[in-house]
């Protein structure tokens, strides 16, 4: 058994066949958490989980690239990346997401976090861009703390700021925060900091694109979660659209690097997911 802890069957790439993908995945022993990145896709994740068999859960959140977007030149790139139609540039509606998160199918808040990949060109716009992302990120951390749910964190080119924020919430504000750093691409030193705060490290098909071998070998197996981020980051052993069943290739790579069996990786990462998300 494996649990794909970060899938997006709630995205447009699966709008015509997500039911078949779910059945195919469950038949192969792969469960999944569909992760929201805006209100509509968060609601869709819950709707999918609510009518599916056991083994399908949801997470709700507002992705940082939708936190106060105002630049028309990046709208198309962002829309292509997430296949979303609506722009929640007005901010994060705490109460609306709180209502969604009360579903028994919701196991986490996210994906949320910080993403500094798309940078406005002027200093003023860049400062506004950073401020809005941080404001919305903080609100989602507060929601996770209030509802006692783990967080699924997205971080791109922003590890120092993201770590500083969650460290402050945990150590200075006594928030009961835990969660996973999704699609980890940082350094070993950065991974160590997250691990010291009790966070898990999420690994997916990016490990076939970047050389993270040494880092993966150092991360304790009991702190690793496996994921696909489907429909993106398809492992080279597959082709086309990524799917939850391809999480097995990520697990095989981890087993190879750690010189242990696939079954051991499967068993432990599944145990980790059940523990973090209380499945």
Image (spheres, rainbow, N blue to C red):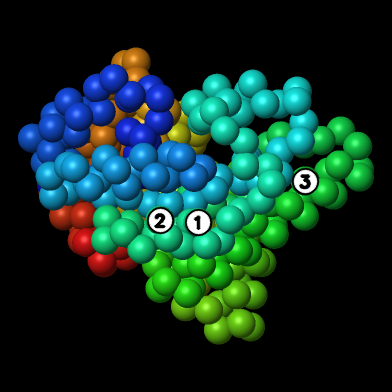
Q: Is residue 260 visible?
A: no
Q: Are marks 2 and 3 in contact (CB under 8 Å)?
A: no
Q: Is 61 left, or right, of 87 in this rendering?
A: left
Q: Which residue corresponds to mark 3?
A: 129
Q: Residue at x 77, y 55 (%)?
A: 131
Q: Is 97 left, or right, of 190 in this rendering?
A: left
> In the image, residue 268 lies at what x, y percent?
21, 58
**10 Å neighbourhood of mark 3: few (<14), some, or many (≥20)?**
many
Q: Is residue 251 visible?
A: yes
Q: Which residue corresponds to mark 2?
A: 100
Is the residue 111 above or below the residue 210 in the image?
A: below
Instruction: Point out the image quarter for the C terminus.
Output: bottom left
> In the image, residue 195 lies at what x, y percent?
46, 66
> In the image, residue 209 lies at what x, y percent?
47, 29
Q: Disc 2 vs disc 3: which is toward the camera?
A: 2
> In the image, residue 168 lies at what x, y percent?
64, 75
User: Of label 3 and label 1, which has the lower sequence position?
Assistant: 1
| Res 96 label | 1
Q: Residue at x 69, y 57 (%)?
A: 134
Q: Are marks 1 and 2 in contact (CB under 8 Å)?
A: yes
Q: Are marks 3 and 1 in contact (CB under 8 Å)?
A: no
Q: Can you tell which quarter of the image residue 205 is in?
A: top left
Is the residue 236 above or below the residue 53 in the image?
A: above
| C-alpha separation, residue under disc 2 versus residue under disc 3 | 26 Å
Q: Nearer the viewer, residue 183 or 33?
A: 33
Is the residue 169 above or below the residue 39 in the image?
A: below
- Dot 3 falls on a residue whose secondary structure is helix
């Amino acid at each position: 058994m494996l649990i794909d802890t970060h899938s997006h069957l709630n995205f447009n790439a699966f709008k015509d066949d997500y039911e078949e993908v779910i059945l195919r995945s469950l038949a192969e022993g792969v469960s999944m958490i569909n992760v929201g990145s805006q209100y509509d896709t968060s609601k869709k994740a819950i709707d999918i989980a609510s009518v599916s068999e056991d083994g399908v859960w949801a997470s709700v959140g507002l992705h940082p690239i939708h936190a106060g977007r105002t630049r028309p030149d990046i709208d198309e790139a962002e829309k292509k990346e997430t296949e979303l139609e609506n722009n929640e540039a007005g901010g994060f509606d705490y109460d609306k997401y709180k209502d969604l998160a009360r579903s028994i199918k919701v196991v986490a808040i996210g994906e949320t976090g910080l993403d500094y990949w798309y940078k406005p060109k002027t200093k003023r716009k860049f400062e506004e861009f950073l401020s809005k992302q941080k404001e919305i990120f903080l609100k989602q951390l507060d929601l996770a703390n209030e509802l006692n749910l783990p967080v699924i964190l997205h971080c791109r080119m922003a590890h120092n700021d993201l770590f500083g924020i969650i460290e402050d919430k945990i150590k200075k504000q006594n928030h009961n925060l835990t969660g996973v750093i999704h699609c980890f691409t940082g350094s070993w030193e950065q991974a160590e900091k997250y691990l010291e705060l009790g966070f898990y490290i999420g690994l997916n098909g990016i490990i076939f694109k970047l050389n993270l071998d040494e880092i993966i070998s150092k991360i304790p197996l009991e702190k690793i979660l496996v994921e696909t981020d489907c429909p993106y980051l398809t492992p080279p052993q597959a082709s086309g659209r990524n799917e939850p069943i391809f999480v097995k290739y990520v697990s095989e790579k981890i087993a190879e690097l750690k010189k242990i069996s696939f079954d051991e990786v499967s068993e432990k990462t599944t145990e980790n997911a059940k523990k973090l998300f209380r499945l």
